[in-house]
Image: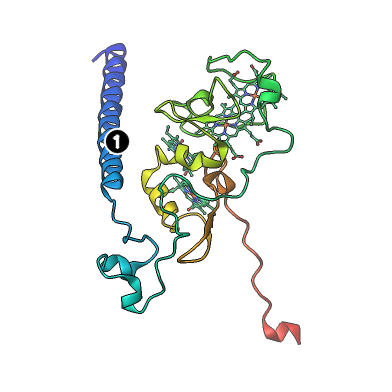
Amino acid sequence: MPPREKQIYQMLLTSTKSLLWMALLAVLVSTAVLSCNGNESPAINEGDPLHRANPLIPPTELGLPPTPTAVQKDDLHFPVPPPPFSEDIYPCSNCHEEIVTNPQRRILTDAHEEIIFTHDEQNRWCLDCHNPEDRDKLRLASGQVIGFEESYRLCGQCHGPKYRDWKAGVHGKRTGMWNGKKEYLLCAHCHNPHSPRFRPLAPEPSPERPEAIR
Ligand code: HEC
Ligand code: HEC
Ligand code: HEC
Ligand code: HEC
């Protein structure tokens, strides 16, 4: 094929692929939503594997403490520490109230020059995540506006398996009681949303041998 045609063909191929992925995502999300709504049984408790294995037997009859009520029941809101903003940047509306949103993909020169954007940068731009109408909020692909303290939902749109692991306390950092109150670190506490690769840590020096201390 001549190079021009080949380019067009490849563009078509990638957009068809992403359409298919979006369709798959939509199906997955709707089944997830359905299964959450369908699950009315108050006896089923996330943090309690024994109890979950026997949803019909009250925990007290298994010799376990009564079902704790403080356990996270909804799947969207998690207690987190404040988002890790730089000093004096938030509220964004301090400046943005006065600035007309420029949706053009461009190199920023009048502010935010320090942001290095290397996060799927071929396909993404600031306003895929930041809400153009109210800069103090984020915006999901669905159009739903969310606060910065819920940014995990933004990340979870594209990083489903990591989001699932994070909710389960397998990825990231969760502290608190195994069967009670918990606190989660936001993805943004560890990953810079603009260049999210986890930066390598410099290793600590090895411990001194006892001989060397004597
Ligand atoms: C993948 C989604 C995403 C994209 C794309 C994105 N951001 Fe962000 N940005 C975030 C999130 C999430 C935070 C909040 C981090 C936190 O909790 O401190 C943030 C924080 C910021 C902040 C505050 C930074 C600070 O120092 O505290 C600024 C300014 C910002 N973004 C501007 C931009 C600009 C400009 C672009 C485009 C070049 C952009 N963002 C692209 C998700 C995104
Ligand atoms: C000190 C003033 C100031 C603050 C505070 C500020 N911005 Fe901006 N921001 C600007 C200016 C000025 C531009 C336009 C830069 C350009 O065109 O080169 C801009 C551009 C942007 C853009 C690119 C899209 C657009 O509308 O031009 C995003 C996204 C953005 N800011 C996000 C944020 C977020 C998120 C925060 C808060 C966490 C924030 N900004 C806080 C001054 C500010
Ligand atoms: C619109 C989809 C989308 C959203 C939203 C999104 N990501 Fe990503 N992310 C990607 C894609 C695609 C890649 C792989 C390409 C790349 O690394 O540039 C990626 C890569 C990553 C990586 C691996 C980087 C590396 O180089 O190994 C991390 C970590 C990450 N994202 C974290 C986040 C966090 C944290 C958020 C929320 C603030 C987020 N992502 C939101 C699409 C997304
Ligand atoms: C406590 C810190 C921490 C938190 C919180 C955290 N991560 Fe990570 N993440 C890491 C580390 C460490 C790695 C591994 C980096 C490596 O292997 O080089 C990683 C890796 C990743 C990767 C790349 C995996 C790969 O295969 O290369 C993605 C994507 C990612 N995290 C997404 C997320 C998302 C989405 C969230 C929030 C829902 C999140 N992370 C929360 C620390 C964290």
Q: Residue at x 54, y 50 (%)?
A: 79
Query: Does label 1 point to a residue whose CB lies under 8 Å from ligand 3?
Result: no
Seen in the picture, residue 66 relative to 129 is either above or below; the reply is below
Seen in the picture, residue 104 relative to 28 is either above or below; the reply is above
Across and down, in percent, residue 32 comes to 29, 43
Across and down, in percent, residue 102 comes to 57, 14
Q: For the residue marked with disc 1, what is the amino acid? A: Leu
Q: What's the colour scheme?
A: rainbow
* Label 1, residues with CA under 10 Å away: few <14, some 14-19, many ≥20: some
The one of 6 and 119 positioned closer to us in this rendering? 119
**Quarter of the picture holding the N terminus:** top left
Q: Residue at x 55, y 20 (%)?
A: 133
The one of 206 and 86 positioned closer to us in this rendering? 86
Apparent side of residue 159 relative to residue 91 in the rendered image (left or right):
left
- How many marks the image carries: the answer is 1
Seen in the picture, residue 121 relative to 156 is either above or below; the reply is above
**Quarter of the picture holding the C terminus:** bottom right
Kind of element beneath mark 1: helix
Q: Quadrant of residue 117?
A: top right
Across and down, in percent, residue 129 comes to 50, 29
Residue identified by numbered label 1: 25
Across and down, in percent, residue 55 comes to 27, 65
The one of 200 and 171 positioned closer to us in this rendering? 171
The one of 119 and 58 positioned closer to us in this rendering? 58
Seen in the picture, residue 100 relative to 115 is either above or below; the reply is above
Image quadrant of ligand 1 equals top right
Q: Quadrant of residue 93?
A: top right
Apparent side of residue 27 relative to residue 151 in the rendered image (left or right):
left
